[in-house]
Image (cartoon, rainbow, N blue to C red):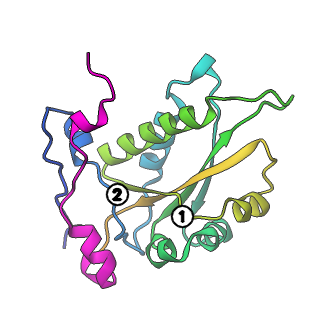
Amino acid sequence: MGAPTLDRTATTDHPVLDVLAGRWSPRAYDAAAPVDEAKLHSALEAARWAPSAYNGQPWRFVVARRGTPEHAAVVESLAEFNRQWAGAAGVLIVAVAETASEDGRANTHALYDLGQAVAHLSVQAHHDGLLVHQMSGFDPAVVRERFGLPERLAPTTVIALGELGDVDALPDVLRERETAPRVRRPLPETLLVDA
């Protein structure tokens, strides 16, 4: 039996790369499938090569594989809604912004640059057949304490990464979200100025 499939390709108004149209954020992860280490490292490598202001590279990652105490600690930090599904992901990655240098100089672009790195990670992972779902619903203080992060390192988002699981095994509310049509605000509503 092959891996489950669920076509979530976006219907775009203008052409975009297939990998971008096909990228989506699942909640159904295969709780038994290990993550291919080569694909995981390619995703992290893509993040490493993201652009950043002054080439500061203000991103750090906590990579926690399912079955480890670190994975359990990240699951513990999640909001209850996310705990319902994210623990099944083969890997949970905490994306951390380096908001100040070791000498205390603020980095005002750290969050933007971290977002770029995570976007690169997401696109590479999707290209390689891994699925990614980013979550803001977690307690950064729990992550900071568990992993001994100094104040200048800000846990910003948690990323579930893994293989697609059985959508029908999700609770009703999650299954509905998983299969609902994908929608986005129309492009003209996004453009503040288009002169």
Q: What residue type is labelled 1?
A: Gly
Residue 39 image point, x, y percent: 41, 47
What is the crowding at mark 1: few (fewer than 14 residues within 10 Å), some, or many (at least 20)? some
Give me the residue at 43% from left, 74% from top: 85
Q: 150 or 123, which lies in front?
A: 150
Give the residue pinned by disc 1. Answer: 137
11 to the left or right of 121: left
Residue 25 is labelled as 2
The total of numbered circles placed on residues is 2
Q: What element carries label 2?
A: loop
Residue 180 image point, x, y percent: 20, 67
As displayed, is residue 132 above or below residue 56?
Answer: below
**Magenta region includes residue 171:** yes
Q: Is mark 1 on a helix, strand or loop?
A: loop
Which region shows up in magenta?
166-195
Taking the view exactly as shown, the residue that stands out farthest to the right is 103
As displayed, is residue 39 above or below residue 159?
Answer: above
What is the crowding at mark 2: few (fewer than 14 residues within 10 Å), some, or many (at least 20)? some
Q: Distance between the residues labelled 2 and 1?
A: 14 Å
Image quarter of the N terminus: bottom left
Residue 139 image point, x, y percent: 65, 64
Give me the residue at 53% from left, 58% from top: 136
